[in-house]
Amino acid sequence: MSAAAAAPAWALRREHTIRLHAPPEAIAPLLTPEGERLWVPDWDPELLTPAARVPEVGGVFVTGSGPERTFWTVVGVADRELRYARVTPGSRVGVVDIALTPDGGDPPVTSVRVRYSYLALGQGGERALAELSQERFAAAIEGWRAPLQRLLGDADAAGGRA
């Protein structure tokens, strides 16, 4: 039996890849707590440690409010990979893995693979995970493409021709 087939109903993994017209080193800073302020509406993380600004392993920040208040910890940083652990108390825990793979070309193109792995902590978390279909997750990640590409400077790709 595969690990995916053995996953309980209250565990979930979603993955989607977008392609951006830029090298990984231009994209990575935009996928950090501070970088996302430039393209995610209403993104306003509260940086609890200085290491969250860079980011560096051990950096902690908070997003959301009320029952969706989420605590994030930077658990991995490499040239082309970012990893965050997140906890929404009483609801769910998860790990976010972002991998940047250059696809070559001139101008350069990079595949951005985004993977969220979740575990529900109670009924509220189970409901939240039940609502996160692969289609809904893919649409959310596709929503990253245009604002990121605008920041990276390729209007044609931002229009959907990537």
Image (cartoon, rainbow, N blue to C red):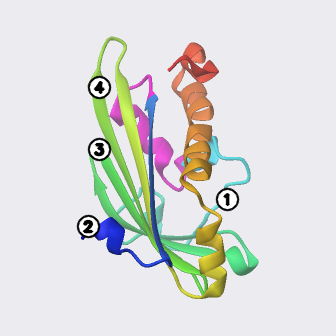
Q: Dots 2 and 3: beta carbons under 8 Å? A: no
Which residue is disc 3 drawn over?
A: 80
Which residue is disc 2 drawn over?
A: 2
Look at discs 2 and 4 and give the one toward the viewer.
Answer: 2
The type of residue carrying mark 3 is Arg
Which residue is disc 4 drawn over?
A: 103
Residue at the (42%, 55%) spot, across then down: 115
Alpha carbons under labels 1 and 3: distance apart: 24 Å
The type of residue carrying mark 4 is Asp
Look at discs 2 and 3 and give the one toward the viewer.
Answer: 2
Whichever of labels 4 and 3 marks the residue nearer the N terminus, that label is 3
Quadrant in which the N terminus appears: bottom left
Alpha carbons under labels 4 and 3: distance apart: 13 Å
Q: Circle 3: is it few (<14), some (14-19), or many (20+) Cα within 10 Å?
A: some
Segment tinted magenta in the rendering: 20-35
Q: Is 20 in front, or is 35? A: 20
Alpha carbons under labels 2 and 3: distance apart: 28 Å
Look at discs 4 and 3 and give the one toward the viewer.
Answer: 4
Judge whether residue 26 is colored magenta. Answer: yes
Whichever of labels 2 and 1 marks the residue nearer the N terminus, that label is 2
Which residue is disc 1 drawn over?
A: 44
